[in-house]
Image: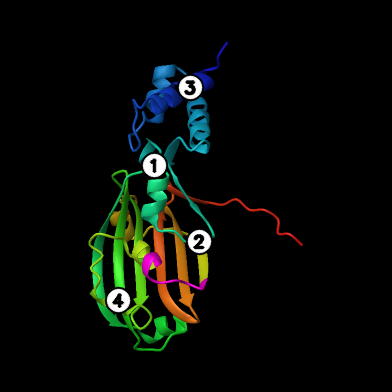
């Protein structure tokens, strides 16, 4: 005999897999499921927790549970642009340039990047949208002494990361990955809740000792993950 817990799990799983419930759809709240299946709240919570562990739903405090969006994997050590990653995974990608400004580095940023103060940079903010939903905020600095062609590039038809990979060879890169909470501005742009968990990738690339670009990508934690396959190095 199938347990009530298994019935709840299977019924919700079937509706998600069949497409009856689409990514982002809200599923019935716990008390509605308790009434429908005539069971305890603990049984419902157990089934929802199991679905969340499988990555099929996202549970949010105070707002309920929602069908999870398919996550895009990013290989941790590779340098690829988001548009290529999305397309290779079979997703639709588009982007919007939210801000574009030429200015000079302040002292704090110059020290952080080990670059001269007052160095001229192109500062960009870009929103990446995958399958119709915000997937990443890109905040990028391009050093104009290293990439002078960027001064006149509008990035109207090609994302900054893809353009740089095509234009400038890099000789060294550093990645920093961390968990962050969405502040008010980030939550608004990514269409998530303030305080929601996000994944941040900070990347700096160099060419022959000179910084080419410094960029931070901020992804909603429920729509993105980093993944990589590694093998032991040969002795």
What range is drawn magenta here? Answer: 165-172
How many angstroms separate mark 4 from mark 1 (CA)? Answer: 31 Å
Observer able to see residue 194: no
Q: Which residue is mark 1?
A: 90
Under circle 1, the secondary element is loop
Determine whether, in the image, residue 158 is placed left or right of residue 14: left
> Of marks 4 and 2, which one's residue comes earlier in the chain?
4
Q: Is residue 49 above or below residue 43?
A: below
Under circle 4, the secondary element is helix
Q: Are marks 1 and 2 in contact (CB under 8 Å)?
A: no
Q: Which mark is residue 10?
A: 3
Under circle 2, the secondary element is strand
Under circle 3, the secondary element is helix
Q: Are marks 1 and 3 in contact (CB under 8 Å)?
A: no
Q: Which residue is mark 4?
A: 149
> Of marks 4 and 1, which one's residue comes earlier in the chain?
1
Residue 130 image offset from top left, x and y in percent:
33, 47
Q: Which residue is mark 2?
A: 178
Question: Badge 4 local density, few (<14 within 10 Å), some, or many (20+)?
Answer: few
Question: Badge 1 local density, few (<14 within 10 Å), some, or many (20+)?
Answer: few
> Of marks 3 and 2, which one's residue comes earlier in the chain?
3
């Amino acid at each position: 005999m199938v347990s009530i817990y298994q019935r709840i799990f299977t019924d919700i799983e079937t509706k998600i897999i069949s497409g009856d419930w689409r990514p982002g759809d809200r599923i019935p709240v716990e008390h509605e499921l308790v009434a429908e299946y005539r069971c305890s709240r603990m049984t419902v919570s157990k089934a929802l927790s199991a679905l969340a562990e499988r990555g099929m739903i996202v549970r949010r405090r105070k707002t309920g549970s929602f069908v999870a969006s398919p996550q895009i994997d990013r290989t941790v050590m590779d340098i690829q642009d988001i548009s290529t990653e999305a397309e290779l995974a079979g997703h639709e990608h588009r982007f919007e340039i939210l801000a574009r400004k030429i200015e000079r580095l302040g002292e704090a940023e110059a020290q952080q990047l080990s670059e001269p103060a007052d160095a001229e940079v192109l500062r960009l903010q870009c929103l990446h949208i995958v399958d119709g939903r915000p997937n990443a905020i890109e905040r990028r600095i391009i050093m104009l002494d290293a990439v002078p062609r960027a001064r006149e590039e509008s990035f109207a038809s090609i994302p900054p990361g893809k353009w740089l990979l095509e234009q400038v060879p890099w000789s060294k890169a550093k990645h920093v990955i961390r968990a962050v909470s969405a502040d008010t501005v980030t939550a608004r742009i990514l269409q998530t809740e303030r305080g929601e968990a996000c994944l941040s990738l900070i990347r700096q690339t160099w060419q022959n000792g000179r910084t080419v670009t410094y960029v931070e990508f901020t992804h909603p934690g429920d729509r993105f993950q980093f993944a990589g396959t590694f093998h032991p190095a040969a002795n």
